[in-house]
Amino acid sequence: MSKIGQSIRLIQELYVDSVDTDKLTEDAIRGMLDKLDPHSVYVNAEENKDELSALEGKFSGVGIQFNLLTDTLYVVQVIPGGPSEKAGLMPGDRILAVDGENIAGVKIKNSTVMHKLRGDKGTLVRLSVLRGKRIQDYVITRGDIPIHSREAAYIIPGTNIGYMRFSRFSLNTVEEFEEGINKLLSSGMQSLIIDLRYNGGGIMSAATEMASYFLPVGSKLLTVKNNRKPFFNEELRVEKRQKINLQRLPLIVLVNEYSASASEIFSGAIQDWDRGLIIGRRSFGKGLVQRPVPLSDGSSIRITVARYYTPSGRSIQKPYIKGNAQAYEEDIYARLKHGELMHADSIKFPDSLRYQTLRQNRSVYGGGGIMPDIFVPLDTTRFNSLEKELLNTASLIRVIPIYLDTERANLLKTYPKAAQFVDNYNLPNTLIDLLKKTAEENGVKWNKQLFAEREKEITTMLKAYIARSIYDEDTFYSLINQQDREYQEAIRILSAGNNQPSRP
């Protein structure tokens, strides 16, 4: 028996108080892994199930997006063709109870609500729903619900530029990418923005396959190395020409400090082959490969088995101190404090980390994420104090279902197509008055002058949230991105035809 097993047995038999040995075991495993690297982790059975669902791109449930605000569950969207839509649920509905158990007006976590709504395919769940002033019960048969990695795919209004946003890389990502590309090409797309900001990664092969659409057959995509176990070593190349040839499509990739792992694999391949421009801020810097190893109780250990290297040979893993996870997790804050998120010249790489791109021999650097070709600083002046309070109290979101209770049908009648809404809808003063009332009810001190300073930005956000509720995510992002610096810079560059990187 190992020392750990002996120790747990001694505690069980001799310790003065009762103990949770399962938790002790989990804590011991976590303690061991913490001494290795920041990405070798223990995942308990419940977390493991949720993570596998996200990577597989589906779970079984009722098919809604919701917000939990002031102990009230608001339906934001109903997934088309899903169980809730078939049962008759609508955006704006408030769910009061699940299977007779009250969830309104009580302290309840998002994760608790999700586990109540999810369940095995074919099982029934009864929801008590408030719509307007009427309460009605709905019995819903749970079914397979897709978890989409592609959040948006649309032609930017007034241009021939396509825009696609991905939140993760999952088993469904390449299929969703192809579907989005076909949609955009049929709408006249002549150049493309892929937005990987806040994309924390996922399945490595999804990133390499997506990159293969933009590169010739034979191009190196990634090298995986394990110095102790050579059987983990692998070199990935573009093996075949994809059905959709995008090798000449002008391309820009957006990244920021939260773009990690598979996002960095994709953007690193594009940058190393001088295939398109990377715009934004230095990415997270995760260059370690984990293999999930399942344990008997449904939990798993994700252990680092290799490092990966971009086509030019650079590792993008940022430095870490074994056993000091806190410093690693606070790296983004350290970048902000150091000024890196606002000033590109505050980032210094040693010459030992310099590599050359494979076509134009431009200098790129390893050792800490993907440094963009064009730096766009964090907009620290974007929100004034009123706007921050409206966001922090979720007042901008809370007001939408209240407004749409009476206006949804009229809006859909007046603007049956999303494009009509985007072009012609202007927020009425009654909605601003309702926002003021809602904000003050949530402890926000309304300031007329501060509102006037940011009226355009606040009203654009409100319009985007309305669009998300009555149309779709594409319309939401087409509106919310109007205020986005990186997005606007990418449009400017593609419109000018200057999307190819060049040597300084």
Image (cartoon, grey):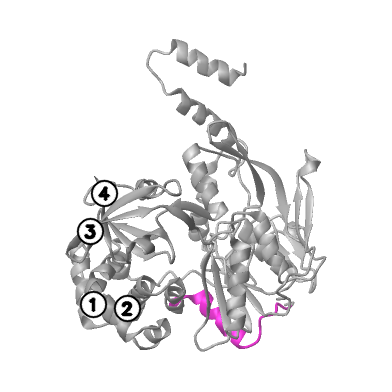
**Which one is nearer the viewer's eye here, 203 or 497?**
203
Whichever of callouts 3 and 1 sits on the residue coming sooner in the sequence is: 3
Circle 2 or circle 3, nearest the eye: 3
Left/right of residue 399 with respect to residue 424 in the rendered view: left
Name the residue: 43% across, 13% down: 15
For residue 3, side relative to residue 209 (left or right):
left
Amino acid tagged 3: Gln
Point out the tag, 2 or 4, that comes first from the N-terminus: 4
Point out residue 349 in the picture as x, y percentages from the top left corner: 67, 60
Give the SS element for disc 4. Answer: loop
Q: Is residue 386 left or right of residue 362?
A: left
Q: Which residue is mark 3?
A: 136
Q: Residues within 10 Å of mark 4 (few under 14, many from 20)?
A: some
Instruction: Say which residue label 2 marks.
Output: 459
Image: magenta residue range: 483-502
Q: Is 103 rendered above or below residue 29?
A: below
